[in-house]
Amino acid sequence: MSGNTLIILGVAIAIILSSFIIGGLGIKKMKSNQDYFGATMQFGPFSTGMSVMAGTVSAFALVGVNGLVYANGTSMALWMLTSCAGAFAMLLLAKKVRGMAELGPVSSLGDLTDLRYNNSRIVKGFMSFVLMLGCLAYLSSQITAGAGMLSHLMGWSPIVSGLVIFSVVAIYMSFSGEIGGMLTQAYQGVVMCIAVVILLVAVFVTTGGMGGVMEAVSAAGTVTSADGTITKSFSPDLLNAWGTSAKAVCFAWIFIPIVGTIGQPQCISRMYALKDPKDVPKTAIINCLSHIIVAAGSVFVGYAVLYLVATGKVQPLAKADDAIFVFADHCGLIVQIAAYTAVLAASMSSASLYLSTSAVCLSKDLPAALGVHFQPKTQLKVSRVTMLVMGIGAIFYSLYASESVAILGTFGWGTLMSATFPPFILGFLWKGISRRGVEAGLIMAAVLNVLSLSVIKWPGSLPWYINVIALTLATTVVVSLLVPDKDKTSVRAKQIDAVIDL
Amino acid sequence: MEITKWKKWLIILSTLLWCVVTVLGWKDENYLICLVLSVFIMGSYLILGSANKGVLKKRFFIYPILVWAVVWIVAFVFAAYFSELYAGVTPPLIFGLHPSLACIMGGFWMGGLLTILLGWRLNKDDWMSSDDWDEFVKKIQDLKKQEEKGGAEQ
């Protein structure tokens, strides 16, 4: 093992251990089940804004996006340039979600739907089911990415790498719940920002700016590796607004991250974690500024690798996903440390978020939807064990059951959107969205998500889930208009009106 | 602007537009119209979410919402125009960027973001003031008392 590898490993272990200690500090802050499940009304704007960013920016953003920028030009970068998405989400929903926490105890998305839709078990059950599918998909992809990175560095087997990183995440999440989750995500968000600033400096030192990249890419034509096995074709179109992907897909990569962020559990759950609702605008600013930094790093590293290959400084890549590591290896030790640290922090923060969301769905919201209610002490124990077992189980599942992970991988961002859009975005923006409307919409979402795996082939090049979401929304609105809520004068209905009018 | 009676129509409009952009998006050449229509979808949600007690203040509608919508539509249209104009050739650069990418980075990424954040910060009381929140909390407490009283009487 070289000296450089040892130093990078040392920094990675320091990040893992410090996350463990910070997660452990969450136990001291935890005073009730509500704190464990939702960190409800516990955090200020900095922790909340950073946590939303760190939960939203997954390992895919730092490994997959720049790989795709290398492969297809700007197209996938559009996804990362949606830094305003957090502000949109908070502007639309934060005061209403936070207001709902004044009506009754809120520690999960299921609690929110209970308050809004008068304890509908159908809404809670179907939403939790679809959320769990989406979160498990994301959890698996974070584990695969994080373990792959450490294996690439150390030459360890993926399962050893996965256990080194993610068993620690499972342990601190199991003991400290969302309190520890939010603390570590905020910390990991800061780590990501610092690491990405180093990457950005390296990009501009290496390329001399985007003018240099365009010059190199325009002149390169076709570049072939020394052994003649890999060829990369260059064109100035790689650096235009849309890259070389289908343009309908570019539309999706702009539209979906913005409206999708509003409906992501890591965003909605953080709205009720905010202590003072008057801090929402500050939270949005912190979230957006940190997202700009990470987005810039993600996108410009992709352009820098195009430059390196176009100028012959590195060989064309065999695997586009190696882009960030190839760039780091070219730049030297400091940049290598920054790249590995950023990817590690991104995968740990997103994994902790998806682990807690899926475990709370499985141990709390789904049983409640089926009529099974635990005493508070028992509920805490059940959820802790579920979180730990799911966390460790997901490591083995992600790294051994690659075929079913690939199937699960088709669920994700769009699946989460289809589960949260009817009850939260539509239902919190207009009181005319009825319980029956949301129930119909969520049943439609669950059925279409599953059928889209194999039975339904949607036309065109748009991601399939856009079709599912459109039909889910249409169903929710049409059924709400046909079957409105009857209760309009009770105290509960007046409370809901007050929240929606806020 | 009182928007309570418009809420239903904004939800119907945004849902219809979702369906329209989905169907139009099946064909690649419709991407620009999809992008422009998506601004109306997001704009509808912004109007609904920014309203305070059923009222959207005119200045909040103009800045940030309307300015944001115009910035994004202009950015998308010019990005599409420049990408067609310079397809396959090396273009003149704007701050080192392809002109179409400069529109996206300047208008869509930074322009949209700064408009929303600055407009929201400047007019944050139109969105929700401290008094609005305190009034809401008091209203909820009163309703809870009313509920408890009703329960006790029964």
Image (cartoon, rainbow, N blue to C red):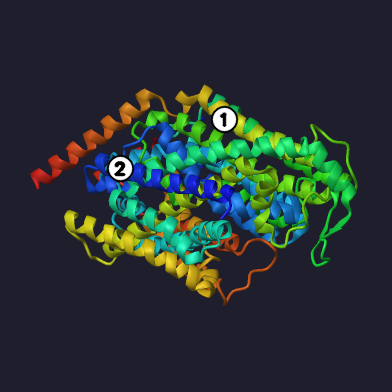
Q: What's the chain of the residue with tag 2?
A: A
Q: Amino acid at mark 1?
A: Phe
Question: In the figure, residue B86 lies in which quadrant?
Answer: top right
Q: Position of residue A430 (x, y in %)?
A: 44, 45
Provide the secondary structure element on which disc 2 rests.
helix
**Mark 1 or 2, closer to the camera:** 2
Reading the image, the residue beneath label 1 is B61
Provide the secondary structure element on which disc 1 rests.
helix
Q: Residue at the location (28% across, 56% down)? A: A119
The relative height of residue A140 versus residue A234 in the rendered view (above or below) is: below
Q: Rounded to the nearest whole Å, what is the CA distance between mark 1 and mark 2? A: 41 Å
Q: What's the chain of the residue with tag 1?
A: B
Q: Residue at the location (22% across, 58% down)? A: A381
Reading the image, the residue beneath label 2 is A26
Q: Position of residue B118 (x, y in %)?
A: 57, 26
Q: Tell me, yes or no, if residue B74 can be seen here.
A: no
Q: Residue at the location (53% across, 73% down)? A: A451
Task: Assign the N terminus of chain A to one quadrant of the image.
Answer: bottom right
Q: Position of residue A71 (x, y in %)?
A: 74, 56
Q: Residue at the location (73% across, 46% down)? A: A303
Q: Amino acid at mark 2?
A: Gly
Q: Position of residue B13 (x, y in %)?
A: 58, 49
Question: In the figure, residue A163 lies in which quadrant?
Answer: bottom left
Task: Assign the C terminus of chain A to one quadrant of the image.
Answer: top left
The relative height of residue A382 versus residue B98 in the rendered view (above or below) is: below
